[in-house]
Amino acid sequence: MDWDSCVKIELEAKEENAALARVIAAAFAARMNPTLNETEDVKVAVSEAVTNAAVHAYGREGGIIVLEAYLKGNTLTVVVRDFGRGIEDIEKAKEPLFTTSPNEERSGLGFTVMESFMDSLHIKSCPGKGTTVVMTKEMGKKDE
């Protein structure tokens, strides 16, 4: 065990579960005494990651999204994992406004938002096997 505390939960791959994931991540991070801005940053990033997994990994077929959160010192690590389609070209998928769903109302900013609200973002994906998004945020800083 290389962390101070952890939580892991499986969610049905539905967009509406992004709200539940936000609350879980924020409640878990609360023990680190985050600022309001830090809490909101985590909630937005987690919401984007879970929504991406629900929409792009499985389409309308359904599946499972795993949400994990770890605390180590002042650092919160959030992992969102799916077992869906995977991403062919991660760098392309990270480009602002890129979307695999052009006929739907999607902005193509999910990874951009995650990257801007968290201190780090790492994406691992294997086509046909799924995607893992790992985000970290140092907590307990003063609001600017």
Image: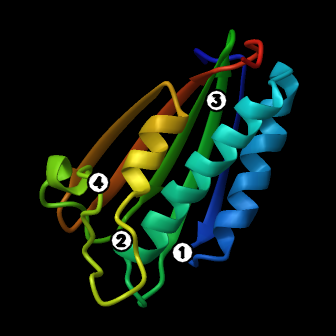
Viewer-nearest of labels 4 and 2? 4
Instruction: Indicate which disc, 3 or 1, sits on the residue closer to the N terminus.
Output: 1
For disc 2, the neighbor class at 10 Å (few under 14, some 14 to 19, many from 20) is: many
Q: Is residue 7 above or below residue 15?
A: above
Q: Amino acid at mark 4?
A: Pro
Instruction: Indicate which disc, 4 or 3, sits on the residue closer to the N terminus.
Output: 3
Q: Amino acid at mark 1?
A: Ala
Q: Is residue 33 above or below residue 133?
A: above
Q: Quadrant of residue 2?
A: top right
How far is mark 4 from mark 3, CA to CA? 28 Å
CB atoms of marks 2 and 3 within 8 Å: no
Kindly identify which residue carries mark 1: 13
Instruction: Indicate which disc, 4 or 1, sits on the residue closer to the N terminus.
Output: 1
How far is mark 2 from mark 3, CA to CA? 23 Å
How far is mark 4 from mark 1, CA to CA? 24 Å
Viewer-nearest of labels 4 and 1? 4
CB atoms of marks 4 and 2 within 8 Å: no
Relative to 67, 92 lies left or right: left
For disc 4, the neighbor class at 10 Å (few under 14, some 14 to 19, many from 20) is: some
CB atoms of marks 2 and 1 within 8 Å: yes
Kindly identify which residue carries mark 3: 70
Relative to 28, 70 lies left or right: left
Kindly identify which residue carries mark 4: 96
Kindly identify which residue carries mark 2: 57
